[in-house]
């Protein structure tokens, strides 16, 4: 998948639905931050903001 398509998916403001558990989301955030691309960093930031604070 090219980067332009990834950004389009990230920026899509469609109705949000819970698809994963908070624990799965935390794991995804950690994995995305290791990946290092701008798109991964932006998605990790957006997911992290939606997670409950510990």
Image (cartoon, rainbow, N blue to C red):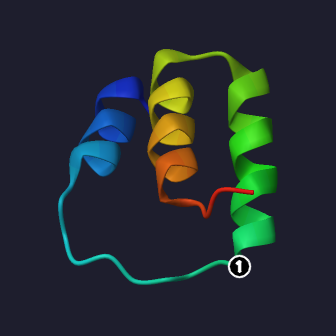
Q: What residue is rendered at 48% in x and 59% in y?
A: 50
Residue 15 against residue 49 in the figure, above or below? below
Q: Is residue 1 visible?
A: no
| Neighbour tally class for label 1: few under 14, some 14-19, many 20 plus, Cα within 10 Å | few
Q: What residue is rendered at 70% in x and 27% in y?
A: 33
Q: What residue is rendered at 32% in x and 50% in y?
A: 9
Residue 32 against residue 52 in the figure, above or below? above
Q: What residue is rendered at 21% in x and 54% in y?
A: 12
Q: Which residue position is annotated with label 1?
A: 21
Instruction: Name the foreground residue: 18 vs 39.
Output: 18
State the quadrant of the C terminus. bottom right
Image location of residue 6, percent across then percent down: 39, 38
Drawn side of residue 18 relative to residue 14, left or right: right
Image location of residue 4, percent across then percent down: 29, 28
Q: Element at badge 1?
A: loop
Image location of residue 21, percent across then percent down: 71, 79
Q: Is residue 26 visible?
A: yes
Q: Hey, which quadrant is residue 15 in on the image?
A: bottom left
């Amino acid at each position: 998948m090219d980067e332009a398509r990834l950004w389009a998916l990230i920026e899509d403001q469609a109705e949000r639905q819970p698809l994963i558990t908070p624990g799965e989301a935390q794991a995804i955030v950690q994995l995305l931050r290791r990946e290092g691309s701008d798109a991964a960093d932006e998605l990790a930031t957006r997911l992290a903001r939606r997670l409950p604070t510990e």
